Image: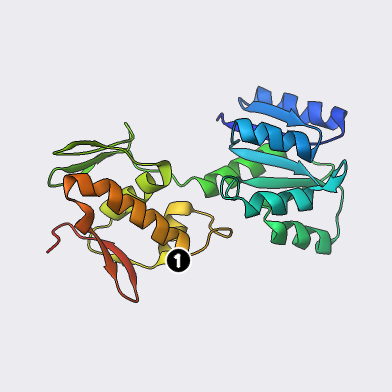
Amino acid sequence: MGGSILIVEDELVTQRLIAASLERAGYKVTRAPSAAQAEVAIREVIPDLVLLDWILPGTTGVAFLRQLRTERRTKQIPVIMLTGRTEEFDKVTGLEAGADDYLTKPFSHRELLARIKAVVRRRAPLLGDEPVEFGDLKLDPAAHRVSSGSGKINLWATEFRLLHFLMTHPDRVYSRGQLLDEVWGDHVFVEDRTVDVHIRRLRQALQAGGHQKMIETVRGAGYCFRANPD
């Protein structure tokens, strides 16, 4: 299992109980009793997931969540809200603010672990382990490496997943929405134009080896990986 989780919870007993359960399950846990301290923790290390209480000193979890969703560095951190509020209106408010899931207190730690795994799975689609290559362009998922005749090509994680998906589905056109589904997994907080940004970065990275033309823009339809570009 593993991964890093930030618990933002001002009730210390609850905070400790959750932390102990997650640590037993193999997670690395950071704790913050307020939104201000959570901001400090996130500035140091981006967690894989945030467990966020609704009521916090001086603010609300919903307000802090909206702040996270407006900042580029934190907008895609998976967040599960923890709260004693049971009304449907409150749940909708939390989800519309950007929560990936909503867990009502009291909850079992078994349920919490299941929710965490489900959210992380949606946010991080799995890659196959088999290398893919076209000409001298090669992508090795197991080694997380892309190379060409000119040497290693450095890609960020999202561009790597995007290239892997396109290379494993050559000569098929995918819309921005389809790519968001396939590459981002749960794209409820991601805008379509985000795809354009990552495609542009991917082409720039492939340019050194002369492979940028393999990523083709199909006007009005989306993008396609051409195994044999013109």
Please indicate whether residue 40 sits to the left or right of residue 2 in the image. Answer: right
In this rendering, would 126 be left or right of 111?
left
Q: Residue at x 66, y 49 (%)?
A: 68
Residue positioned 32% across, 48% down in the render: 164
User: In the rendered view, would you say 175 is above or below 154?
Assistant: below
The image position of residue 46, as x and y in percent, is 59, 36
Q: Quadrant of residue 139?
A: top left
Quarter of the image where the C terminus is located: bottom left
Q: Is residue 168 visible?
A: no
- Which residue corresponds to mark 1? 177
Q: Amino acid at mark 1?
A: Gly
| Image quadrant containing the N terminus | top right
- Name the spot of residue 152 as percent of width and height, x first: 24, 35
Q: For this view, does 173 lie left or right of residue 80?
A: left
Q: Quadrant of residue 4?
A: top right
Residue 165 appearing in the image? yes
